[in-house]
Image (tube, rainbow, N blue to C red):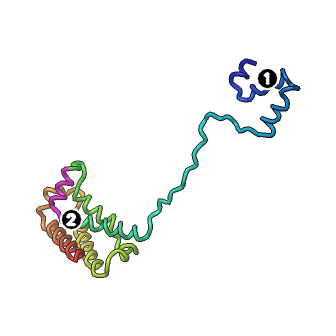
Amino acid sequence: MWFLFKYDKYSKSIFPLFFFNALYAPIYYYRVKIRKRPLRNKINKPMQMESEDNSIKENEFLELTRNNIIEVLKLWSSKDEQLEYQKNVPHVNVVGELYGQWDDFYEPGLEAIKDAFSQRELVLLEKFDAEINVQVDKYNIQHLQLDDFIFTEEWKVLNYLSTDILNQIKN
């Protein structure tokens, strides 16, 4: 009886009903049946999760695509940024990363790229992509180190092309 009284939420109503049944029955009936008291749960009710719309809109995707390609071109056009990147992340092959980022962001057949850039800009990007593809086919990019690669003719060509493309895109 003590256990029920101590730990059962509703046993407190049963004791008066058992001992004072004629007097307490209307009160018990009112509390339990008529009022239909809610459970006295001390655990917080789980909060309803509000669903958020995390989808990206088409114009945001086009802007993001354009910005990613321009950022890769900025990285290609800046010797200082490349050296800074190498300094900040010494365990990464920056040369391979430069080529890899271009391959990741630039897909010539992708409709988003055609929508994000004008026809004149697309011609410039195709020219840069063609030069990168020639170099990838010609050299083993994964084993080049940035300190050596900066002084090569291939780096100078890509650096000049990326700088030229950025200047023409801004105009």
Find the residue positioned furthest to the right. 22
Q: CA distance from mark 2 to mark 1?
A: 83 Å
Confirm or deny contact between disc 2 and disc 1 (CB under 8 A): no
Magenta-drawn stretch, dominant element (helix, strand or loop): helix
In the displayed structure, does residue 100 sit left or right of residue 78?
right
Three-letter code, disc 2: Trp
Q: Nearer the viewer, residue 132 or 134?
A: 132
Residue 162, percent from left and from top: 20, 70
Q: Which mark is residue 30?
A: none
Q: Secondary structure at mark 1?
A: helix
Dot 2 or dot 1, earlier in sequence: 1
Q: Quadrant of residue 4?
A: top right
Amino acid at the residue labelled 1? Phe
Front position in the image: 138 or 88: 88
* Residue at x 23% of width, y 74% of height: 170
Identity of the residue furthest to the left in this view:
151
Which quadrant of the figure has residue 1?
Answer: top right
Residue under label 2, please give it.
76
Q: Is residue 79 magenta?
A: yes
Q: Secondary structure at mark 2?
A: helix
Q: Position of residue 78 (x, y in %)?
A: 17, 63
Looking at the image, residue 7 sits to the left or right of residue 51; the answer is right
Which residue is painted at 24% across and 73% down in the image? 128
Stretch in magenta: 76-87
Instruction: Name the residue beneath numbered marker 1.
Output: 15
